[in-house]
Amino acid sequence: MTDANIWEVFRQERKGQAFQHAGSVAAPDEAFAEVYAREQYGRRGESAALWVVPRDQIHPIEDFVDELNRNYHRVDGYPLKQKLKEARERAGTSRAAAGDS
Amino acid sequence: MQERAELLLEIADDELILGWRDSEWTGIAPFLEEDVAFSSIAQNEVGHARALYELAARDLGTTADELAFDRKPEEYRCSELVELRLPEWERTIARHVLYERADAERLARLKESGDEEVAGLAAKIDREEAYHRLHAEMWHERLQDEPRYQAALEELRPLIGRRDGHTPELEEIWAQMTEVRRSVPGATW
C-alpha cells in the first residue's frame, strides 16, 4: 500500500484532553478508514473522539540542526549545578563550609 | 413451544450461523484491516446469539449451550440466507448487506415490543449492529456497480426469511460446529 492508503489515527481519551497518536489503518478511502478506525481504536469505549488523517496530508519535519550548540535555548541546556559548584569554590564557600547539611 | 422462545431462537440461530459463516473469513479476508473488522463482526454475532439463547433458555428451562449445540439440524430456525458457505467475497458482502438491512427492521420492531426484556435486549444488540450496518453500507457503496456483486444480491435476496426448510449446507456447518461438544457428551467445560 502507498502512503495514500494509510490513515493516521489520533485518539482523545476524554473530552477536553489532547489528542494523541494511536496508530494507523490501511484503507482505500475515507469511509473505509472511518470504519476501520472505529473498529480498532473506538469500539471498547477507550476513546471520546478520533481524528483520522491521510498520511500524505501530513507535512513532516525531521531535519533539525543545532550547529552552534546553542543549548541555552533548551530547558535542560543550562546546567546550573556545575556552575554553582564552581562559583562556590571560587568564593571559598563550599556547601560544607557554609554549614549546609 | 412458547411464542417468545420461538422468536428468540429464530434470531439467535440466524446470528449464530451467520457468525460462524463470517468467521470462515478470519485469516483469509481480502486485506488485513478487513480481516480484523469482519472477524470482529462475526464474533459480535455469536455474542448476540448467546444473549438471545440465554433469554430463551430461561423460558424453556434449559441452557444457552444446549440450545446452541445440542439440537438437531432440522430443529434450527435460521433462514437459508445465513446457512450458505460463500467463499466469494462479493457474495459474502451481498449476504452481509441483505442480512443487516433485514435485521435492522427486525430489531426496530423488537425495540417497540411491549415485552421489556425483549425490547431491552434488542436495543443493546442494535447498538452494536449500527457498526455492522456502517460496514455493510460502505462495502455496498463500493461494489454496487459491479455486475458480480449485483448478481449476488439478486441470487441471495429471495433467501431472506426463508425458514420452511434448510439447505444441505446447514447440516455440514452443524457437524463442524458441534463436533467438539459431541466428542465428549455430558462434559462440563
Image (cartoon, rainbow, N blue to C red):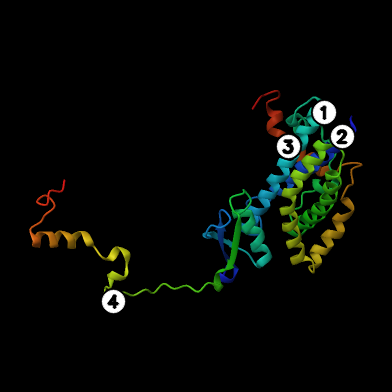
Outermost residue to the bottom: A67
Mark 3 to mark 4 CA distance (whole Å): 65 Å
Judging from the image, what secondary structure is the residue with disc 4 in?
Answer: loop
Comparing B50 with B163, the one in front is: B50
Which chain letter matches label 3? B
The residue depicted at 78 percent of the width and 33 percent of the height is B55
Q: Quadrant of residue A2?
A: bottom right
What amino acid does circle 2 point to? Arg
Give how far across and how far down residue B183 sits, in percent: 69, 28
What amino acid does circle 3 point to? Arg
Mark 3 to mark 2 CA distance (whole Å): 16 Å
Give how far across and how far down residue B12 sits, in percent: 79, 39
What amino acid does circle 1 point to? Asp
Neighbor class of circle 1 (other Cα within 10 Å; few <14, some 14-19, many 20+) is: some
Outermost residue to the front: A99
Work out whether mark 3 precedes mark 2 in sequence or the reverse, and give the earlier one. Answer: 2
The residue depicted at 75 percent of the width and 41 percent of the height is B16
Mark 1 to mark 2 CA distance (whole Å): 8 Å
Disc 1 and disc 4 in contact, CB within 8 angstroms = no
Disc 1 and disc 2 in contact, CB within 8 angstroms = yes
The circle on residue B59 is 1
